[in-house]
Amino acid sequence: MKRRLLMTMMAMVLAFSFTGCGNKKADETTATTEAASEVKDEFIKFVGTDIPKMDTEEAEIMKKFNSYFAEGTAVDTDALLKDLTDNLLPNYKTFLDDVQAIEVTDEVKALKDQYYDAMNAQYEAMQKVEAAVKDKNKDIQTEAQKLLSDAQSKYTAYNDAVYALAQKENVTLNGEIATTATSEAGSTTEANTE
């Protein structure tokens, strides 16, 4: 009788241990699915809400910046310098701070970092334009143009990464991800620094 009771108890212990393993595997699968869903949700919010809002700020700054380089007109370097110092650069810095303040994790953070790097390169280019105008230095102007080109390349890499993550997360992107003035700024900064 004792032996039969012992065997029954052992069978119950084994049954509970197998049940525990099954639940653990189910819990792990559920956790993985929830994590994947969180990445997808965060990604959708980032490219669908956060970045378009940021791009609106950035586009306004770059529209004003690019207006100084309208085709067929001479650049008013005094007005450009004043606007860069008083408005454009401080507003762009605020924009960059706003981008940094977006809270994301893991894979979406990598996207945010790429976006920030592209926009920061553009900010540095605008700072170089300010220095070129102040110092009347064509070499600094050339550096600014290179930084704008780098910003455009970095933004292209960011877009590629967005499309790759969208594909991985099975997210359909409608139209353009985001519109920025980065591509428009690539051919500007031809300020006469003489």
Image (spheres, rainbow, N blue to C red):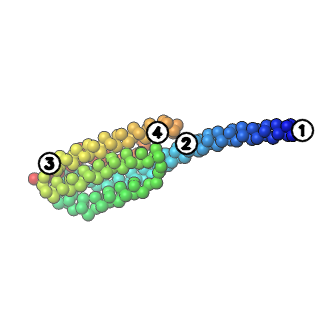
For label 1, the SS is loop
Task: Give the mark nearest the N terminus, 3 or 1.
Answer: 1
Q: Does the rendering let one see residue 72?
A: no
| 162 shown above or below 140 | above
Which residue, given by chain and number where applicable, does mark 2 sit on?
36
Residue 31: image x %, image y %?
60, 44
Question: What is the x, y in percent for residue 46?
Answer: 46, 48
Q: Nearer the viewer, mark 4 or mark 2?
A: 2
- Asked which quadrant contains residue 156, the reply is top left
Q: Do the numbered discs 4 and 2 sit on residues whose CB atoms are within 8 Å? A: no
Label 2 Cα crowd, 10 Å radius (few <14 / some 14-19 / many 20+): few
User: Dots 4 and 1: beta carbons under 8 Å?
Assistant: no
The reply, left or right, for residue 9 in relation to residue 82 is: right
Q: Which amino acid type is marked by label 3?
A: Asp
In the orientation shown, which residue stands out farthest toward the left? 194
Q: Amino acid at mark 1?
A: Met
Q: Is residue 118 left or right of residue 140?
A: right
Question: How many other residues sit within 10 Å of disc 3, few (<14), some (14-19) or many (≥20)?
Answer: few
Task: State the separation of the CA atoms marked 2 and 1.
Answer: 52 Å
Q: Residue at x 41, y 48 (%)?
A: 112
Of badges 4 and 1, the one in the foreground is 1
